Amino acid sequence: MAPPLTPAEWRAALRAEGVPFIELDGWTTRGRDAATGKIFGPVHGVLNHHTAGVDSLATIAYNGTAGLPAPLAHGLLRKNGVVVLVADGRANHAGLVAANVYRALVDEEPLPKQDKSETVDGNDCLYGLEVENLGNGKDRYTRQQYDSWVRFNAALCRAHNWGQGSVAGHLETSVEGKPDPAGPVEGYGRRGGFAFTMAQLRADVGERLAHPASWSPPTAQEEDPVNPQYVNLGLVHGYQLASGEWTEIQFTQEWNDEPGDHAANSAVFVAGPARFHGTLSLRLEGLPEGEVVQVRQSEYEGTTLKGDHPIDEVIGTGGGTFRVLPLVNRLGSGRTMRVRLLNQHSEDIEVASAVLKVLVWQEG
Ligand SMILES: [Zn+2]
């Protein structure tokens, strides 16, 4: 036994689920309960419709249609993904529901084909959502609209502790051959265009319900291979840097190396084709004030040095010298990048720590 949501519960459920909504004046007292003498509830599910028209709000909220007084739904889902709350009482949307389908809905069993020999009044027990669409098989549900559609159904299910089996379409319950909802959908999450089906809507509602209400479906954009990977390398121990020759930093500590380019050679931190952006933090011990250690990025093919990038200088401050250097570059196919140091001081110094953090966008 589930009483219908109060207005406060409606708002809380929709907000938690991320459904954009507005409230039509008077929605909290609008309904057919008084006119019919039948109280809305207990509720057993959400029934989905398409409007088969545009700008249907006045019809749904105030005017109704011939022989069918308003309200005609609890909510209207517009093309822009915004739900207009119309009524929280009894609404004229479901009509007669095949009793075998009604029982399956209550039990959250797969919905059988309608047996029309016995019916129940669906307006007693079903929330109704009208989704704006011409219903001509060509008009597409927008991405925002479908996203809100899934969220709206999930919000009501979550609020009542229902599963996706409490979600139905008018075409599944009606004994009068209603065809709605149907039509092409622009896309959802990673999915491009697809044809609306109740099975897919239920699956999408089920996926939402398996996550917290604040969840959003991953989009194709997030899967895009141009999104960066993260490399974070360092040193287990400091090492001596001899005077007067270029040497590569051999990274011996690997906190994170998503591209896996470090594994083959401890000096390599990125392999082309790629772009990268990050920092190298160096701590040097024993570099006297004013003395210089040069730093440069060098490109290799295999073990062959192919090119050097401009030099940065770390100038000794006496005692410990600390510098953060930018690492930004684009690397061609077949090339790897290393960092090299040249100690210009006349004596050995210690590279006490070297921490490299870069984001890598693999290309090609
Ligand atoms: Zn309908």
Image (cartoon, grey):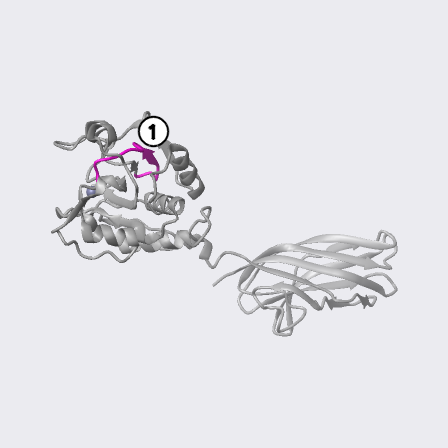
Quadrant in which the N terminus appears: top left
Q: Which picture quadrant has residue 50?
A: top left
Q: Name the residue nearer the viewer: 13 or 288.
A: 13
Q: Is residue 289 left or right of residue 218?
A: right
Write the residue at 26% across / 30% down: 31
Q: Name the residue nearer the viewer: 232 or 240.
A: 232
Residue 170 image point, x, y percent:
21, 46
Q: Name the residue nearer the viewer: 185 or 115.
A: 115
Q: Main secondary structure of the magenta part?
A: loop
Q: Is residue 210 left or right of residue 25?
A: right
Q: Residue furthest top?
A: 25
Residue 82 colored in magenta in the image: yes
Query: Would you call the spot at circle 1 few (<14 residues within 10 Å), some (14-19), or many (20 or more)?
Result: some
Write down the region rendered in magenta.
Answer: 79-93
In this view, 28 is above or below 17? above
Residue under circle 1? 28
Residue 147 image point, x, y percent:
36, 46
Q: Name the residue nearer the viewer: 2 or 112.
A: 2
Residue 296 image point, x, y percent:
70, 60
Amino acid type shown at disc 1: Thr
For ligand 1, the image quadrant comes to: top left
Q: Is residue 29 left or right of residue 300?
A: left
